Structures are given as structure tokens and as C-alpha cells.
Amino acid sequence: MRTIKIAAFAAVVLAGAVSALGWPGGSGIDRATPLGEPRPVWTEGRWPFPADPWGKGKAFRCKAADCGGEVDVYLRAKLGFCNCTTGVADDGDLERMGDLDLIGGEATALGPGRPITVGSMQGRSRAYALTARDRRGKSAVAIAFNERCDMIAATAVLQDVRPATIEPAIVAFLNSPTVLRWAEAALGL
């Protein structure tokens, strides 16, 4: 009986410690990690674009206070659009499969793209300066990742011109339970 009481007490203490420190991959409501570093807080909003063949997606915003500058992330599934064999293998694939057209399409790459991983899916990410006259922001990060022949296109629009500083937080958000659950449902995984 004493062993059961000790085990129960240990479980309660452990649960309290996890709750106090914040569980990694949790809701994202906490504004700081256990080490006191800022953590972006993403809030879902409405899809701001007109209907097109790919349909509506998901829209999320991180306020300037949480991300160092306002960031909008737009996600949507593109079923059957990805190369089933190679996926999003290079920057040319990313340009063809990404969603920069949603935000005006006039953009200049700020350097080569890089491979990324979102859940069990592989893809690519690349930063751009937005050059359209009626642009939504100053820079963007285009991301595409796939599962077999289906893919998710993510476009992050930033109000500043330093996408490299926020790109890791965007990829971390794409790896959050919120996005991964949605991606699984959207891709039928």
C-alpha cells in the first residue's frame, strides 16, 4: 500500500512539474520556454483570399510582440500536385508548387532554398523579398512539403525584410500538433 501511495505522489509531482514548465509541443499559449526565451504564439484567423481551384486553407498570425515582427502564415493542401517520386526536391519544384501567387507572386529570392522536415514529410523552404506594388508585406518564406503525391504549401508573409530570423520559428510551428493534425486530415493520412 505504501508503494502505491509513493507512486501516486510521484505521478502528481511529475504532472505538476510538467504543467509548470510547459510541455514541448503544447498549445503554444505560453509566451516563454522554461529557459525564458520568447516563444511565438500563433492565432488562427480567416482565410483572406478568394476561391481558386485549390480551395481555402488555414491562416495563422503571430503578432509583433511574440515574433519580433508581424507574421502571417497561410497553409493549404494541394492533392495530387506533387511529383510522387521526388517530392519537393529543389528550388524549381518549390517555385512551381508553392503559393507565392496568393500574395502577388512578384518576389525575388534572397538566396538558395534549404531542405526541411515537417512531421514525417520532407520539403523545401526559401526566403523572398516581395516586390509587388500592392504587396501584403516586405518579405516572405515559401515552404512546400509532401506525402507521396500530395503536398502542403505554406506561405509566410513578414512585415520586415529579415525572414532568416523567423524561418526556424515558422518551421517549428509547422511541426506543431495543431498543424500536423490539420495536415494529416487534409492529406487523408
Image (tube, rainbow, N blue to C red):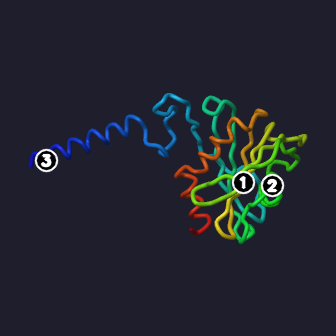
Q: Residue 64: where, in percent of width, then height? A: 66, 31
Q: Residue 138: where, in percent of width, then height? A: 81, 36
Q: Secondary structure at mark 1?
A: strand
Q: Secondary structure at mark 2?
A: helix
**Residue for point 77% across, 65% down:** 53
- Between marks 1 and 3, how big is the CA–CA gap? 52 Å
N-terminal-most mark, 2 or 3: 3
**From this viewpoint, which residue is outermost toward the right?**
133
- Between marks 2 and 3, how big is the CA–CA gap? 59 Å
Q: Dividing the image into 4 quarters, which one contains the C terminus?
A: bottom right
Q: Are marks 2 and 3 in contact (CB under 8 Å)?
A: no
Q: Amino acid at mark 2?
A: Asp
**Residue for point 64% across, 47% down:** 171
Asked whether 21 or 50 is in front, the reply is 21
N-terminal-most mark, 2 or 1: 2
Residue 9 in the figure: left or right of residue 151: left
> Which residue in the protein does label 2 denote?
91
Q: Amino acid at mark 3?
A: Thr
**Residue for point 52% across, 32% down:** 31
> Which residue in the protein does label 3 denote?
3
Q: Residue 81: where, in percent of width, then height? A: 75, 68
Q: Are marks 2 and 1 in contact (CB under 8 Å)?
A: yes
N-terminal-most mark, 1 or 3: 3
10 Å crowding of disc 2: few (<14), some (14-19), many (20+): some
Q: Amino acid at mark 1?
A: Arg
> Which residue in the protein does label 1 denote?
124
Residue 50 in the figure: left or right of residue 116: right
Residue 33 in the figure: left or right of residue 141: left
Residue 180 in the figure: left or right of residue 157: left
10 Å crowding of disc 3: few (<14), some (14-19), many (20+): few
